[in-house]
């Protein structure tokens, strides 16, 4: 290692929500952290539903105080079978109070979420050093990994967290393969206003081409995630605001009254993937460097924060037991890989099954889905179990 190499306990590669949250959390665990990423773009009209322990995570790390005023509470989640299939499921409404909670969580726009996490990183300047450069190379130097940056700098770290998204350069550098699959779907994402109140209730309409989901985004406003065939999404995207508002109103049965589109539109391809390993050497994968799936059931970023929470706990415990010594990154990475395997596999598999059950014309699958939702509606223990699992329980 050259004299110019800078040494850290942990290096985090990636400057999106996952990378910012990871840097903040491990810094609070006592580590000296290098955050390697250019400043993130906030040109993103999507929202993130923070469920279960995610809000508590952000509260513990001083992030939530900046978000509470702009977050929309989620008290109920309603599922509506809007398909025309033979076996149709009944409408089911899940209420947080049934499991002793005031709320399931909150819906937050991605722009304010990234801004709040960026402020948290800046407030820890004594423990987090930011390198506004791209990760380029991964090498080894004794008891540390060596990361070469596009700026020409070299960073040394005992443990490296890959939080650089679906096309993770760090995952590729460490040689972890991914299993990928596609769906005949795209998503149209936008924000809209409506004349009727949403009563803090998200509504997910299940169609033969995927879910059509409206999530509260403040008084008189909701966020739309419309998953459908690419040709349908292309036609909808070409409509002017007035015509698109009428089409959205028609598809949700005027559940929210008159619809007015009031944001730009974004289109996203729908696919899924899972890394075959969650750790290798001194590198661990979190968030979309490790897993990705359709936006169903608000599982994505909540799973990411559970990844980060686990690596934070491992770093905290390792730092306490290695007083005066370098953090043992290889042991920490092995521990993380074993600890997160079941939760990640279960969520990825579950969301994939739910999406395919909507797309499938296979009668037994339709019957199984309808039966499951009937049980959720009629049998309270089943409904409670599904709510707890949806919030991150096993």
Image: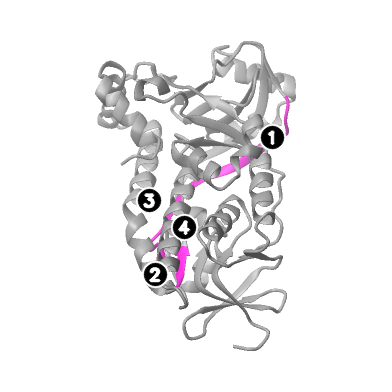
Query: Taking 276 as reference, is 185 left or right?
Result: right
Q: Which tag is nearer the camera, tag 2 or tag 3?
A: 2
At horizontal 32% and vertical 61% (from top left) the residue drawn is 338
Label 4 environment density (alpha carbons within 10 Å; few <14, some 14–19, many ≥20): many
C-alpha span from label 3 to label 4? 17 Å
Q: Which residue is mark 3?
A: 344
Q: How many marks?
A: 4
Gap in angstroms between the C-alphas marked 1 and 4: 36 Å
Residue 156's x, y, as percent? 57, 78
Secondary structure beneath disc 3? helix
Q: Which residue is mark 1?
A: 265
**From the viewer's perspective, is residue 87 above or below residue 157?**
above
Marks 4 and 2, Cα distance to the nearest angstrom? 14 Å
The reply to whether callout 2 and callout 3 are in contact (CB within 8 Å) is no
Bounds of the magenta segment: 262-284
Q: Nearer the viewer, residue 132 or 321?
A: 321
> Nearer the observer, disc 4 or disc 2?
2
Q: Earlier in the sequence, mark 1 or mark 4?
A: 1
Q: Are marks 4 and 2 in contact (CB under 8 Å)?
A: no
Residue 273 forms part of the magenta stretch:
yes
Q: Position of residue 129 (x, y in %)?
A: 66, 66
Residue 208 is situated, as x and y percent measured from the top left of the image, at: 43, 28
Q: Between tags 3 and 4, which lies in front?
A: 4
Read off the residue under disc 4: 312
Main SS category, magenta section = strand
Give the SS element for disc 1: loop
Q: Which residue is mark 2?
A: 321
- Residue 369 position by quadrant: top left
């Amino acid at each position: 290692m050259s004299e110019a190499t800078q040494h850290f306990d942990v290096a985090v590669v990636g400057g999106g929500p996952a990378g910012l949250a990871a840097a903040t959390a491990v810094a609070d665990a006592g580590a000296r952290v290098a955050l390697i990423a250019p400043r993130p773009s906030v040109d993103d009209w999507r929202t993130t539903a923070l469920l279960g322990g995610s809000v508590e995570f952000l509260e513990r790390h001083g992030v939530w105080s900046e978000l509470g005023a702009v977050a929309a509470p989620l008290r109920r989640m309603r599922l509506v079978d809007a398909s025309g299939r033979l076996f149709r499921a009944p409408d089911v409404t899940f209420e947080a109070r049934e499991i002793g909670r005031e709320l399931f969580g909150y819906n937050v726009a991605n722009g304010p979420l990234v801004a709040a996490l960026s402020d948290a990183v800046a407030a820890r300047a004594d423990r987090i050093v930011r390198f506004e450069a791209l990760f380029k190379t991964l090498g080894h130097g004794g008891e540390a990994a060596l990361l070469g940056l596009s700026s020409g700098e070299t960073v040394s770290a005992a443990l490296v967290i890959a939080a650089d998204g679906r096309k993770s350069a760090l995952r590729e550098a460490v040689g972890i393969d991914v299993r990928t699959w596609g769906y005949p779907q795209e998503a149209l994402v936008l924000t809209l206003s409506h004349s009727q109140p949403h009563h803090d209730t998200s509504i997910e309409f299940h169609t033969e081409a995927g879910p059509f989901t409206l999530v509260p985004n403040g008084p008189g406003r909701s966020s739309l995630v419309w998953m459908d065939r690419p040709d349908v999404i292309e036609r909808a995207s070409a409509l002017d605001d007035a015509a698109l508002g009428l089409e959205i109103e028609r598809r949700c049965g005027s559940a929210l009254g008159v619809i007015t589109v009031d944001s730009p539109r974004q289109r996203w391809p729908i696919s899924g993937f899972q890394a075959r390993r969650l750790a290798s050497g001194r590198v661990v994968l979190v968030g979309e460097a490790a897993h990705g799936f359709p936006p169903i059931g608000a599982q994505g970023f909540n799973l990411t924060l559970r990844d980060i929470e686990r690596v934070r706990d491992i770093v905290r415990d390792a730092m306490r037991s290695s007083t005066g010594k370098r953090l043992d990154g290889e042991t920490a990475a092995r521990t993380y890989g074993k600890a997160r395997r079941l939760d990640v596999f279960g969520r990825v598999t579950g969301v994939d099954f739910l999406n395919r059950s909507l797309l499938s014309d296979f009668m037994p699958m339709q019957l199984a889905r309808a039966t499951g939702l009937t049980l959720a509606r009629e049998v309270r223990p089943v409904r409670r179990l599904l709510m707890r699992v949806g919030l991150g329980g096993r």
